């Protein structure tokens, strides 16, 4: 009877302590959930800001590219004269006349493409004319790609702090326990010392 009363008392006491701690656990859980929610909101806001910044940068780059191509398009004529004159089986006269004709066509193409880029700057598309600027790949002949192909933007993932690597597990070496041997030797030394001192 006494044992069951003790068990009942201990169980009741344990339950009372557990119930007393429940509000503390609930507050801790609520605080953790609130912190996680705030962190998620900050990450979403940062992701949206990064996407807006990327869009603004792409629009600015496209408008600048359009203006630059319109302003520098006449440089296509000397570029083509030089490139055609330096081709194998070519001469200066062929380079001059061929360069003026092809350079004039490339000039018109670069001006029209630059005007198109300025007008459609809010729509981030891939560049149509390659190379992008007159001075890029100077020896390369211009080529024209597809119009209005949107830039492939990878999804911006929010930054997640890297998880530190696990700590290395210490390898436990067996201990060479000689305490028994040392304690017996020490006892003998003390006994001998004590006996010598007593004989004096």
Image (cartoon, helix red, strand yellow):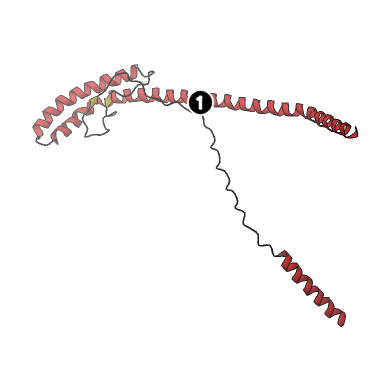
Quadrant containing the C terminus is: bottom right
* Quarter-of-image position of residue 39: top right
| Residue 107, above or below 89 | above
The local secondary structure at tag 1 comes to: helix
Question: Taking 7 as reference, is 79 left or right?
Answer: left
| Residue 40, above or below 138 | above
Q: Is disc 1 surrounded by few (<14), some (14 to 19) or many (20+) residues within 10 Å?
A: some
Q: Give whichever of 177, 155 is nearer the camera.
A: 177
Q: Give whichever of 47, 90 is nearer the camera.
A: 47
| Residue 46, above or below 168 | above
- The residue at 18%/23% (across/down) is 104
Number of labels in the image equals: 1
- The residue at 37%/26% (across/down) is 61
Q: Which residue is mark 1?
A: 47
Question: Taking 181 as reference, is 43 left or right?
Answer: left
Give percent across and percent down for residue 23: 76, 26
Quadrant containing the N terminus is: top right
Q: Give whichever of 129, 151 is nearer the camera.
A: 151
* Quarter-of-image position of residue 25: top right
Task: Kindly give the residue lying farthest to the right in the view shown.
Answer: 2
* Quarter-of-image position of residue 150: top left
Task: Kindly give the residue lying farthest to the top in the view shown.
Answer: 119
Give percent across and percent down for residue 85: 13, 34
Task: Kindly give the residue lying farthest to the bottom in the view shown.
Answer: 200
Question: Taking 91 as reference, is 200 left or right?
Answer: right
- The residue at 12%/32% (across/down) is 95
- The residue at 34%/19% (across/down) is 118
Give percent across and percent down for residue 11: 82, 31
Give percent across and percent down for residue 194: 84, 76
């Amino acid at each position: 009877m006494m044992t069951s009363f003790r068990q009942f008392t201990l169980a009741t006491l344990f339950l009372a302590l557990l119930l007393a701690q429940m509000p503390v656990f609930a507050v801790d859980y609520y605080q953790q959930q609130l912190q996680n929610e705030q962190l998620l909101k900050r990450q979403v806001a940062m992701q949206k800001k990064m996407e807006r910044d990327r869009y603004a940068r792409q629009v600015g780059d496209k408008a600048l590219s359009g203006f630059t191509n319109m302003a520098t398009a006449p440089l296509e004529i000397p570029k083509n004269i030089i490139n055609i004159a330096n081709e194998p089986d070519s001469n200066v006269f062929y380079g001059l006349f061929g360069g003026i004709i092809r350079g004039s066509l490339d000039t018109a193409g670069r001006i029209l493409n630059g005007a198109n880029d300025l007008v459609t700057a809010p729509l981030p598309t891939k560049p149509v004319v390659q190379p992008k600027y007159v001075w890029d790949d100077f020896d390369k002949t211009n080529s024209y790609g597809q119009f209005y192909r949107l830039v492939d933007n990878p999804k911006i993932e929010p930054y997640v702090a890297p998880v530190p690597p696990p700590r290395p597990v210490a390898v436990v070496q067996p201990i060479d326990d000689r305490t028994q041997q040392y304690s017996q030797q020490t006892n003998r030394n003390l006994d001998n010392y004590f006996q010598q001192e007593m004989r004096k």
